[in-house]
């Protein structure tokens, strides 16, 4: 497959990559033009028997190696991924690249991820739903960018995009739920922060038409539109 070297193509490929790599919790995700990179947290139990460092040529991280070997030769997002195992610390890390694209992923073990890393008071079952919310957001953004390019013409718009987690008053939401359901309520809001790298004024106006009902956020020096898409928010410069 010939890669679409644009932000639109990177969003489409990145969304499919997130799903097919295992729908793991995204600790972080960033798009810079057509370069998509994400850090995922390995799901508990997906590696079976676990190993820990220090590693050596005689003692390799067999759990991470087996995970990668099972997926070698299998397509991801229309490409055949390459894998590299990093074994210099206590826990192995799995680097993934889609050749011919600028889509990259890093899978870290659960022990490496702290609640503070995602601005949350705690980690838990709420993480299981975040990958889906992020992929829905990426899908909408890719469609909106494609539409504004088609309608306004010109070179395909290029963006930067970051996934951030913002604290909010989640305790009010918990108070309305039974105990078993409380574990599923995220104590943070995932937000996709968009910034324009290159886009014509007509493309930006066409894009913003999709944000009907959006609220205002940001600061006086950085005013933004905030638009809710189910379990995720999208922020765009005003």
Image: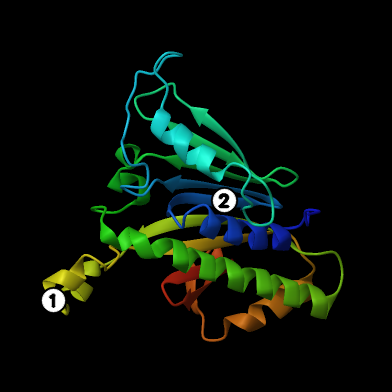
Query: How many other residues sit within 10 Å of disc 2, few (<14), some (14-19) or many (≥20)?
Result: some
- Vertical order, 208 against 90 (above or below): below
Residue closest to the eye, 164 or 35:
35
Query: How many other residues sit within 10 Å of disc 1, few (<14), some (14-19) or many (≥20)?
Result: few
- Vertical order, 186 against 143 (above or below): above
Q: Residue at x 28, y 62 (%)?
A: 187
In the rendered view, does 101 fall on the left or right side of 57? Answer: right
Label 2 residue SS: strand
Q: Outermost residue toward the bottom?
A: 213
Q: Residue at x 62, y 70 (%)?
A: 141
Quadrant where the N terminus lies?
bottom right
Q: Residue 226 location in percent, x, y? A: 50, 73
Q: Residue at x 51, y 80 (%)?
A: 214
Which residue carries the number 2 mark? 30
Q: Which mark is residue 178?
A: 1
Q: Residue 131 location in percent, x, y? A: 45, 61
């Amino acid at each position: 497959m010939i890669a679409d070297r644009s932000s639109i193509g990177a969003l489409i490929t990145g969304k499919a990559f997130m799903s097919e790599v295992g729908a793991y919790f995204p600790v972080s995700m960033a798009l810079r033009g057509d370069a998509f990179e994400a850090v995922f947290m390995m799901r508990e139990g997906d590696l079976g028997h676990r190993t820990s460092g220090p590693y050596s040529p005689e003692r390799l991280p067999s759990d991470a190696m087996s995970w990668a070997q099972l997926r070698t030769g299998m397509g991801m997002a229309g490409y055949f991924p390459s894998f590299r195992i990093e074994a210099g610390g206590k826990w192995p890390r799995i680097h993934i690249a889609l050749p011919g694209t600028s889509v990259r992923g890093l899978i870290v073990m659960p022990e490496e991820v702290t609640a503070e890393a995602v601005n949350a008071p705690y980690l838990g079952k709420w993480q299981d739903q975040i990958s889906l919310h992020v992929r829905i957001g990426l899908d909408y953004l890719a469609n909106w960018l494609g539409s504004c390019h088609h309608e306004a013409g010109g070179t395909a718009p290029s963006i930067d995009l970051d996934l951030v987690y913002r604290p909010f008053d989640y305790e009010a939401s918990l108070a309305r739920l039974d105990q078993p359901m409380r574990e599923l309520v995220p104590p943070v809001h995932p937000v996709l922060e968009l910034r324009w790298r290159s886009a014509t004024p007509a493309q930006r106006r066409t894009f913003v038409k999709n944000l009907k009902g959006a609220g205002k956020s940001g600061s006086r020096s950085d005013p933004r539109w905030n638009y809710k898409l189910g379990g995720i928010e999208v922020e765009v410069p005003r």
